Image (cartoon, helix red, strand yellow):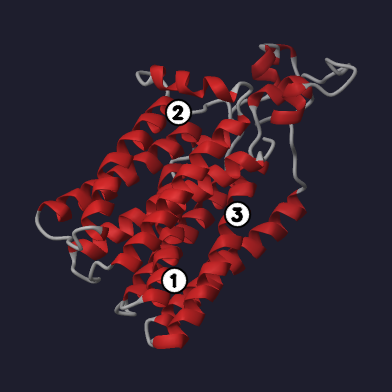
Amino acid sequence: MHPAYSVIFFTTASGAGYGMLVWLAILAATNAVSPSLASGVTIFVVALGLITSGLLSSTFHLGHPERAWRALSQWRSSWLSREGIAAIVTYIPALLFALGWIVFASVDGNWRIVGLITGLMALVTVACTGMIYASLKAIPRWTDATVVPIYLAFALSSGGALIITVLAILGPLTSQWAWLVALATALAWALKLLYWHRIDNAAPVATAESATGLGHLGTVRQLEAPHSGENYIMREMGFQIARKHAARLRMIALLFGGAIPILAFIVAGFVGGPALMIVALAGLAGTVVGVLLERWLFFAEAQHAAMLFYGAKAV
């Protein structure tokens, strides 16, 4: 599949924003941080800014962005509609959570409940995003059982890296929370390694023989290309990346997105002050690079079943 930058930005930015809301709900519920104007404004502006910009960028991938609102009407059958509705609904508790944190400087009682609802809705929205891709049977690599857990894990990993960095700068925060972010990061990349192993060793779901229904006659081969020039399907669904390039990019993503942040956030659990801020920033930088590469590969390595009619042997 063609890795559209608008969709890559959408899934990474909104995922990080929702992840921040989940972590903030947990921190508030456990009284790990005290509400303050500076922390509240910074965290909610960053989180909601990432969510909003990500959602808006997703409309750029549509042929008619002005009609994006119509997607909400298909909630009975479309995960895209469900995601859109969940995203809109999440704004309600999120803004109330921000009100309690910033204006009333409270995360107790009903404000705590609002925070937990915000975190839950954030997870629901990310799960719906993952299901948009996991439900597309025409792209076998996306239907793997690990896809939705991976989306959730990377949202928690990137959101955790962001919130630890913000609180390391603004404080105060018990630095041991960074260990939980390291754990979330390790879980995300463990799931990704499992995903890569599964798709690399999966048996073909469809072949040129099964797609044409001519398998009983023997091996099917293409005599002539269906078009004399490149068309939309070939551009959007026929993108291919060489195996050696994919392997190299996987290693780079694992190094920057996995090894560096995990090490950084483990170290962050032992330090404080300026040292905490420095290692948190290093962990955040590695996370950004790694997640962007991971998401690019998610699209670039996928192959649409339509390509069976354009020369592909199997998908």
| Residue 65: % across, % down | 58, 25
Q: Nearer the viewer, residue 100 or 250?
A: 100
Image point (62%, 31%), residue name: 61
Q: Is residue 244 left or right of residue 133?
A: right
Q: Nearer the viewer, residue 85 or 102?
A: 102
Residue located beneath label 3 in the image: 292
Q: Element type at marker 2?
A: helix
Residue 37 vs 75, above or below: the answer is below
Residue located beneath label 2 in the image: 80
Name the mark on residue 165: 1
Q: Quadrant of residue 88?
A: top left
Quarter holding the C terminus is: top right
| Residue 150: % across, % down | 45, 50
Q: Element type at marker 1?
A: helix
Quarter holding the N terminus is: top right
Image point (83%, 15%), residue name: 226
